[in-house]
Image (tube, grey):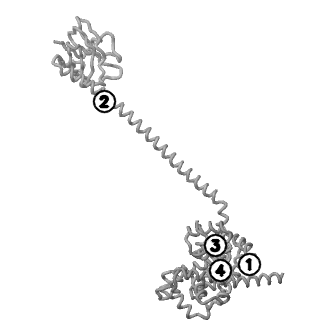
Amino acid sequence: MGNDQNLILHLKRRDKKALSSLYDKYAAALYGVIVRMCKDEQAAENLLQDTFLTIWEKSETYDFEKGKFYTWAFRIARNKTLNFLRTPNRLIQTEDLSVYNDRTEAQNNDIDQYKLKGAIAKLEVHHQKAIELVYFNGMTHREAHEEMDVPLGTFKSYIRQALQELRKLYGHTIAFLMILIEVIR
Amino acid sequence: MMDKTYILEENLLERYVLGELNAEEEHQIEVALNKFPELKDELSSIEANIESMTFENAIQPASKVKSQLLHSISNRKTEVIPIQNHSSKNPYLVAASIAALFLMSSIFLYSKWNTSQEQIRIVERQNYELNKKLDKLQKDNEKTQALFTSINNPDTEKYVLKGNALMPEAKLISYVNDKEKSVIVNTAYLPDLDNEHDYQMWADVNGEMINMGIIDTNQEMLAMTYIDYSESLNITIEPSGGSDHPTVSKLITNIYLK
């Protein structure tokens, strides 16, 4: 992901090819988040397209200093999906009074399709759940601790421990990738 | 400023990455990030975690999403590119607009000012004319008052001079006050003469006719020169401008004073 900077500079200059490349690189990861949050493929596709339109139109507001491009894109996708889920019309359509119940129930139904893979799957169950609620269901810490029915302080430590655990797990992967890259060179 | 431990304990970096903090909190986090390099490392680690996690759980979207996206960008392209180009021209456009507005308002105000000036001139002129009229009326009034006062004086004698055979329709009313030594005549009943002739009034003192003045028929009431020891009043028709001696053949009326 080292050549992102060059692509992003081209994106900022309204280079369509740059957007196409960034889409190829990040769309699937973002779509994985969006579709798990809204549990609706049609809506998720629209939200993904909308996310990339915003990336295209607001590219000049992205600041390299403030963080990675992917984080910025992830935040746009997450906010767009949350806004969509919080729209009153959406509640009427789904005939459900609670957005959050809707999200967790639906998730149970599609458990196989949206089951989390990779390092998260190796986490302890409560850590996995905490990460899932925040990163793949789009909940705030406050909403998520209520959902898990644990005190907020406990929930915060779940997240912290989970992130540390993930860092360890990914640390191995990154080291492995670095070796791989060196070998290819 | 936020404490480093507090930031870590409260998972504020993670919430910062998720965009859950308000603007003030975000600003404080950014200040802390600049101060503590270890926080920056932590932030990078969280970002890396999110990236790895979501990549591991990526789901390929339908290919139509990308084609729709690129299509809609092509449609928007015409809207988007000019915005960039405009940014360099904008200051000039803004300056030009302000200048144009300024010019327009200046022209408007100048024309307003001109109109106002013109109106002030008109009003001033009218005011001057009215003052002149007022002055004249006041003078006329004073004169009339003076005439009225002298006519109504118990010492004033009224004489009506009636035209002889030469001009039977002519009449002149005279008010003579010997005490105040004044003679006032009312010319209303004197027929108009041609431009080459004037009425002239004479006082007879011991058989000598002394000039009392030309009677200006344009004025209704007129003060004549008072002559002491006058025995009679006489009116002749003289060439325009009057004569030193009366043309007796043109005497139209006379009256003896009491």
Residue A1's label in the rendered image is: 1
Q: Secondary structure at mark 2?
A: helix
**Mark 4, other Cα within 10 Å: few <14 / some 14–19 / many ≥20:** many
Q: Nearer the viewer, mark 3 or mark 2?
A: 3
Q: How many marks?
A: 4
**Foreground residue among A103 and B258:** A103
Residue placed under numbered mark 4 in the picture: B69
In the image, what residue type sits under mark 4? Leu
Q: CA distance from mark 4 to mark 2?
A: 92 Å
Q: Answer above or below: position of B170 versus B245.
A: below
Residue B164, percent across and down? 21, 18
Contact, mark 3 vs mark 2 (Cβ under 8 Å): no
Q: Is any atom of residue A138 visible in this view?
A: yes
Lower position in the chain sequence, tag 3 or tag 1: 1
Lower position in the chain sequence, tag 4 or tag 2: 4
Q: Secondary structure at mark 1?
A: loop
Residue placed under numbered mark 3 in the picture: A57
